[in-house]
Amino acid sequence: MPSMNERKPCINLAEPSRGGAVIWVSDEFFAPAKRMLKPDEPHFDPELFDHNGKWMDGWESRRKRAQGHDSCVLRICPGVIYGVDIDTRHFTGNYAPAASIEACRVVLDPDQAAGWTEILARTELQGNAHHYLRIASREAWTHLRLNIFPDGGIARLRVYGKPEYETEDQQHPGPLVNLACAGEGAAALSCNDMHFGDMSNVLQPHPPSGMADGWETRRRRTPGNDWMIIRLAQPGRICRAEVDTAFFKGNSPARCSLRGAFLDHDPADDGSTLQWPEIMPPVALGPDQFHSFEREIANIGPVSHVRFDIYPDGGVARFRLFGIPGAEPS
């Protein structure tokens, strides 16, 4: 790890509020990988159990009975990584005995062709302990693959580094507001399906209470994808999108994308006759977790309406679009 002086300007690049998210995991039978990214300290309740066994505040895979090891792919705030903390606190007889980390830099999310570079060689771990480990690479990365050997649990993963892009205050002069908040006048105008949950739920300002308090489509059995059109509370330039799949575990969308337009009227039906420039290309979503997208957002100028696409189907609890209000089209 860097010295205290070196670490002072570093931030946790894996924190969900900065874009950190789990986009793939090999196994999370006992505890979901997204818990590793929680900003609070891990805790232990000896009396707490769930339907799979002992509840643990972190990521825990099942006991492996075959060759291989477990892995988790994370999207991070793009930046240079100086060190990590692999924290196994409260994992004693069930901690991961060893771990390694690989990294890649891709425009969207990694696919089979993504090239991974090992930035932390396989390292032995102890139970119930912090492991502060230096990262020698000074390249900027967008995604990490955490490997544990062969299985087990990790309470928290902190990825200390410096972000590649400017801070929000430098990048966006003026305060950002949620342009997609129903409480401020935003409205869900149309969608192709809302069999299990109403589309207007995603714009509500209060936290979701369950799957019924989100937008959920039926299982798609034909080609294509599901979509929703939203009138913003006021026109503005989109700077950050937040997509929350809370409570949607086996039924969250695989990906989502965003397009927008500046209109003087509400579009009819799916707005297929209109031009919808791309604000955000398709990006991966994980189940039951918060996602924040900023570097993926293109500046297409102010918009009054957006089209939110999910691929191919599924459920979203909340959708927020932070931007600069009051802008006019050029």
Image (cartoon, rainbow, N blue to C red):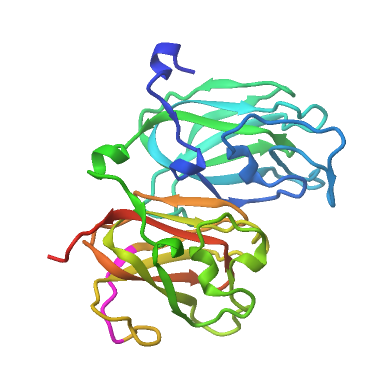
Instruction: Specify start and end residues of the magenta stretch as a single range.
Output: 273-279
For the C terminus, the image quarter is: bottom left
Image height check: is 2 above or below 287?
above
Task: Please provide percent x and percent y for residue 212.
Answer: 66, 68
Residues 106 and 308: in front is 308
The answer to whether residue 152 is left or right of residue 25 is: right
Residues 226 and 194: in front is 194
Q: Is residue 72 covered in magenta?
A: no
Q: Mostly what secondary structure, the magenta segment?
A: loop
Task: Please provide percent x and percent y for residue 288.
Answer: 62, 55
Image height check: is 166 above or below 303?
above
Q: Residue at x 75, y 27 (%)?
A: 90
Q: Residue at x 82, y 46 (%)?
A: 65
Label total for image: 0
Say if residue 304 shows up in the picture: yes
Say if residue 3 shows up in the picture: no
Q: Residue at x 73, y 23 (%)?
A: 128
Task: Please provide percent x and percent y for residue 221.
Answer: 61, 83
The answer to whether residue 49 is left or right of residue 164 is: right
Task: Please provide percent x and percent y for residue 307.
Answer: 38, 72
The answer to whether residue 60 is left or right of residue 325 is: right
Q: Residue at x 37, y 63 (%)?
A: 281
Q: Is residue 275 covered in magenta?
A: yes
